[in-house]
């Protein structure tokens, strides 16, 4: 099943240097998305000015979705962006992610009915990130010592067919390279806005997709992305967020109350018809971003 329109959502907060590199990489894609939506979690005016500059050179529509700065509210920021999306298929990346030129094309080809896609990433160290900012581009190499998870640099159709597979767990969830059908996001009511601060909102969203019978497919050696180096975000809310995730798993929830619907026009939603899945376990925690 091939998506008709791709909406690429890029999250950001007060890091214009990284966001510019991320968006410029989108302009170089072999297949462009239908639109770019910048999900801005309360950045200063510098980000607005950058987005306006990028709009002038962009070959596609750019939408700037903004909210007030009230701390880390990534779930709400993504829901607001989702509500503005015109695509039937959503690809999520973060504003510290630079995508390889076949990224959108690879995700389109990987799309499957009743599935969401989890991609992988390459981690840049501080030196490689500084070099990328100076040149405003990436020139990655499999043998570059400044890269971590270097095998993920490989883009290979044969290896991708061999190693990509469907799984039924939460381990390794990273919504910095993640794709799903918009209808499935509406079905589970998007991201849970009870999450404040860094951590677990992506795993909880994934758990509800799995509980709803939506299959997870890990995409390997395609849709390559490079994660720019930055300091680790504060984990001060992680314990509270773990409790929300644990509740969703324990109660086998398929929808959250505080989610996407509050940002959408009122409409009659269809009941979930997917076969429930039982298997996500709290002990299978995601790896940190």
Image: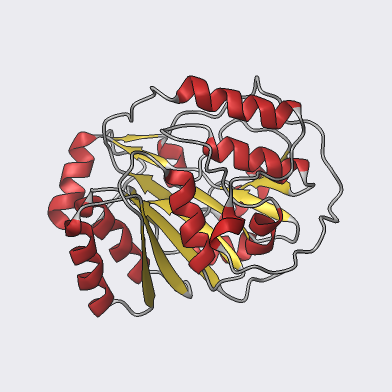
> Measuring 59% from the left and 23% from the top, which residue is drawn there?
243
159 vs 45: above or below: above
Please indicate whether residue 287 sits to the left or right of residue 168 in the image: left
Residue furthest to the left in view is 134
> Measuring 20% from the left and 72% from the top, which residue is drawn there?
53
Q: Nearer the viewer, residue 248 or 90?
A: 248
> Measuring 18% from the left and 65% from the top, which residue is drawn there?
49
Mark count: 0
Please indicate whether residue 91 sits to the left or right of residue 187 in the image: left
Q: Is residue 169 something that shows in the picture?
A: yes
Picture coordinates of residue 161, whole percent (x, y): 66, 51
283 vs 207: above or below: above
Q: Nearer the viewer, residue 222 or 202?
A: 202
Q: Nearer the viewer, residue 56 or 24?
A: 56
Please indicate whether residue 109 sits to the left or right of residue 251 in the image: left
197 vs 186: above or below: above
Picture coordinates of residue 277, whole percent (x, y): 82, 39
Picture coordinates of residue 268, whole percent (x, y): 75, 68
> Measuring 82% from the left and 58% from the top, which residue is drawn there?
271
Q: Quadrant of the C terminus?
A: top left
Q: Is residue 103 something that shows in the picture?
A: no
102 vs 221: above or below: below
- Colour setup of the view: secondary structure
Q: Quadrant of residue 4?
A: bottom right
Please indicate whether residue 270 sits to the left or right of residue 68 in the image: right
Picture coordinates of residue 149, whole percent (x, y): 42, 34
Q: Quadrant of the N terminus?
A: bottom right
């Amino acid at each position: 099943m091939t998506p008709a329109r791709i909406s690429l959502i890029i999250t950001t907060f007060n890091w214009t240097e990284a966001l510019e590199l991320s968006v410029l990489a989108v302009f170089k894609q072999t297949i462009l998305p239908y639109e770019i939506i910048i999900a801005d979690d309360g950045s200063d005016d510098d980000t607005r000015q950058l987005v306006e500059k990028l709009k002038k050179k962009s070959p596609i529509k750019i939408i700037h979705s903004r909210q007030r700065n009230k701390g880390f509210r990534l779930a709400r920021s993504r829901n607001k962006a989702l509500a503005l999306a015109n695509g039937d298929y959503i690809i999520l990346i973060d504003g510290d992610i630079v995508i390889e030129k076949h990224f959108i094309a690879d995700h389109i080809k990987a799309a499957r009915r009743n599935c969401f896609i989890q991609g992988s990433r390459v981690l840049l160290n501080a030196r490689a990130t500084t070099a990328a900012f100076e040149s405003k581009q990436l020139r990655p190499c499999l043998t570059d010592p400044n890269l971590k998870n270097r095998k993920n640099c490989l883009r290979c159709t044969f290896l991708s067919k061999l190693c990509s597979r469907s799984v039924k767990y939460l381990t390794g969830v990273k919504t910095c390279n993640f794709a799903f059908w918009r209808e499935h996001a509406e079905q589970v009511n998007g991201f849970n806005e009870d999450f404040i601060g860094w951590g677990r909102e992506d795993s909880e969203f994934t758990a509800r997709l799995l509980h709803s019978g939506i299959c997870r497919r890990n995409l390997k050696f395609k849709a390559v992305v490079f994660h720019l180096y930055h300091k680790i975000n504060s984990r001060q809310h992680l314990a509270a967020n773990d409790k929300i995730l644990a509740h969703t798993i324990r109660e086998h929830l398929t929808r959250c109350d505080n989610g996407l619907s509050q940002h959408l026009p009122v409409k009659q939603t269809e009941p979930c018809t997917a076969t429930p899945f039982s298997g996500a376990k709290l002990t299978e925690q995601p790896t940190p971003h």
